[in-house]
Amino acid sequence: MSSSDPTVQPVPTSVVERVDAADVTLSNPKRAVISLGSNLGNRLETLQGAIDALEDTPGLRVKAVSPVYETDPWGVEPGTQSTYFNAVVLVKTTLPPSSLLERGHAIEEAFERVRDERWGPRTLDVDIVSYQDVVSDDPTLTLPHPRAHQRAFVLVPWNDVDPQAEFPGRGTVSGLLTEVGQDGVQVRTDLELRLPE
């Protein structure tokens, strides 16, 4: 990689063409932003497995994958849990939000995610951050994600893959990031997640 910025992974034209060709199979797809996190087991392998599982979902195409960030666990005493690897993926999908949520939970379960403690360690977190411009206070799936606008581990990688992104109802992602700051969120230039082929 000769690029001066190691976090920017140019996507080969052939891959872009293939992804765009695949998009023809999706009629009127919606944009969604999905946040991934892992702090147990082989964290990088788990995140890549989640991305591949998303791509294998009928009616869904992964369009962009952020760099990997290492972040401090949220809401727990420092040093009591290992650090997280976090990433954000942009997808296009014809699935409604409820089906996308079910698929996210199924992928978590495939990686043996256990929901026994709030903010406990987990092999895999799959969160829908936003879905098109939908704003919904449905308790099963609140859109956009009710706390993501305060979390640098979501905003930093999202801003990487889409610097012009808007957070529905809250303004630009870059603007929110300026307010929140980037403390505790370190880019891992030595690690890379692949866009599925």
Image (cartoon, rainbow, N blue to C red):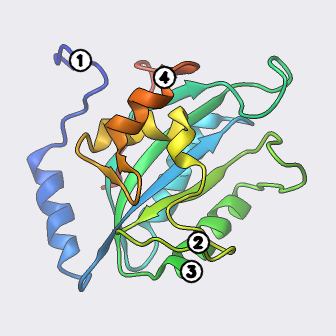
Q: Amino acid at mark 3?
A: Ser
Residue at mark 2 to residue at mark 4: CA–CA distance: 28 Å
Q: Amino acid at mark 2?
A: Leu
Q: Quadrant of residue 116?
A: bottom right
Q: Position of residue 42 (x, y in %)?
A: 66, 35
Residue placed under numbered mark 3 in the picture: 98
Residue at mark 1 to residue at mark 2: CA–CA distance: 34 Å
Residue placed under numbered mark 4 in the picture: 182
Q: Which mark is residue 5?
A: 1
> Relative to 143, is 67 on the left or the right?
left
Residue 66 in sight: no
Give the mark, 1 or 2, whose residue is nearer the N terminus: 1
In the rendered image, the vertical position of residue 54 relative to residue 22, given as above or below = above
Q: Nearer the viewer, residue 107 or 197?
A: 107
Q: Amino acid at mark 1?
A: Asp
In the rendered image, the vertical position of residue 27 relative to residue 39, given as above or below = below
Residue at mark 2 to residue at mark 3: CA–CA distance: 5 Å
Q: Position of residue 135 (x, y in %)?
A: 46, 71
Q: Which mark is residue 101?
A: 2
Q: Position of residue 40 (x, y in %)?
A: 75, 36
Give yes or no for contact between labels 2 and 3 (Cβ–Cβ under 8 Å).
yes
Residue 7 in sight: yes
